[in-house]
Amino acid sequence: MPDDDAVRAWALLMRVSRQMLERVESALKEAGLPPLVWYDVLHELASAGEAGLRPGQLISSMLLAQYNLSRLLDRMEKEGLIARSAVEGDGRAQMITATPEGLRVRRAMWVVYGRQIGMLVGDRLSEAETKALSNLLLKLRLSAD
């Protein structure tokens, strides 16, 4: 069983994470922008470049269930932020790419998102504390693999 400090650390990590995500989501909504998960999809697609990604690649990088991703991609395609194309030689497969409008929306979202990161982390922690926190979280992430 975990000791009291481990339980306290876990509870604080979960609460702070939820609070920060709620702040980011609220700021995006106030700016008339889509939810944060849309940014994550557009970021992954922009990073992939013109080649795009298959839905399975997005699922593994974003840790979304396939049914959630399918609905999300449908909404994003309807808004003109992504495009789907068939994979030559594989009739069932598709590639997903960000459209120019998707890239524009991603940049607009980053202005709000980046500002929130600055206010919620950068303005509250020193450079040394930020590096220490990053190292601790990386240690937790790696130990969970």
Image: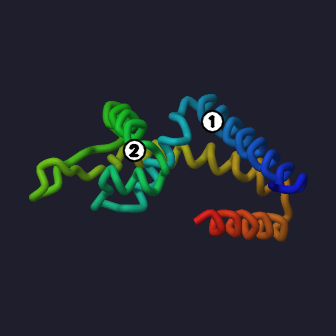
| Mark 2 and mark 1: Cα distance apart in space | 18 Å
Locate the N terminus and report the quarter of the image it occupies. Answer: bottom right
Q: For this view, does 134 lie left or right of residue 51?
A: right
Left or right placement of residue 25 versus residue 76 in this view: right
Q: What residue is rendered at 30% in x and 54% in y?
A: 54
Q: Secondary structure at mark 1?
A: helix
Please provide percent x and percent y for residue 75. Answer: 37, 32
Residue drawn at x 34%, y 53% as measured from the top left = 56
Callout 1 crowding tier (Cα within 10 Å): few <14, some 14–19, many ≥20? many
Residue nearer the viewer, 97 or 32: 97
For image coordinates 53% across by 44% down, the residue present is 108
Splitting the image into 4 quarters, where does residue 68 fall? top left
Residue type (three-letter) at the residue carrying disc 1: Glu
Q: Earlier in the sequence, mark 2 or mark 1?
A: 1
Amino acid tagged 2: Gly
Task: Give the SS element for disc 2.
Answer: helix
x 83%, y 50%: residue: 7
Q: Nearer the viewer, residue 39 or 6?
A: 6
Image quadrant holding the C terminus, namely bottom right
Examine the rendered structure and indicate whether residue 49 appears above or below residue 30: below
Total marks shown come to: 2
- Identity of the residue furthest to the front in this view: 1
Q: Which mark is residue 73?
A: none
Side of 42 relative to 86 (left or right)? right
User: What residue is pinned by disc 2?
Assistant: 102
Question: In x, y percent, where is residue 43?
Answer: 47, 53
Give how far across and how far down residue 109 sits, in percent. 55, 43
In percent of width and height, residue 87 lies at: 17, 55
Q: Which label sits on residue 25?
A: 1
Nearer to us: label 2 or label 1: 1
Residue count near mark 2 (Cα–Cα under 10 Å), binned few <14, some 14–19, many ≥20: many
